[in-house]
Amino acid sequence: LRFREIIFHCNPKPYPKGPKNENQIKYVIRDYYKKCFYLGNDYVLIEIWEDDIRNNFDKVIKQIENAYTAVCG
């Protein structure tokens, strides 16, 4: 079991229509490739947005607990 954090850009909450400029598009594409790499190499990924860490920490804890339970039983 391997965990890895990856950085995601353009949180859909503040950016519901997706990236707005060239740099955001570049970062979103890079994040997608990172996600594919880690999932393809048996990593468990949990997507946690900075906004949730700051404003909805209970949700973050629940995400981590659910992922752990799903993998470890």
Image: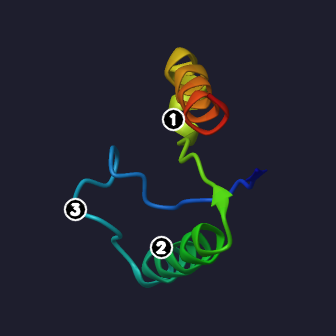
Vertical comparison of 48 with 6: above or below: above
Residue 28's disc number: 2
Residue at left offset 54%, top offset 15%: 58
Q: Which one is earlier in the sequence, the residue at label 1 or at label 2?
A: 2
Q: SS at mark 1?
A: helix
> Which residue is denoted by mark 3 in the rendering?
17
Picture coordinates of residue 4 (x, y %)? 74, 55
Residue 59's disc number: none
Write down the quadrant of residue 7 in the picture.
Answer: bottom right
Nearest the camera: 25 or 30? 30
**Residue type at numbered disc 3:** Lys
Whether residue 51 sits left or right of residue 11 in the image: it is: right
Vertical comparison of 60 with 42: above or below: above
**Residue type at numbered disc 2:** Val
Q: SS at mark 2?
A: helix
Query: What's the CA distance linking mark 3 and mark 1?
Result: 17 Å
Query: What's the CA distance linking mark 1 and mark 2?
Result: 17 Å
Picture coordinates of residue 12 (x, y %)? 33, 51
> Which residue is denoted by mark 1 in the rendering?
51
**Residue type at numbered disc 1:** Asp
Vertical comparison of 24 with 62: above or below: below
Residue at left offset 56%, top offset 27%: 60
Whether residue 2 sits left or right of residue 37 in the image: it is: right
Query: What's the CA distance linking mark 3 and mark 2?
Result: 13 Å
Residue at left offset 39%, top offset 78%: 21
Q: Which one is earlier in the sequence, the residue at label 3 or at label 2?
A: 3
Looking at the image, the residue that sits furthest to the left is 17
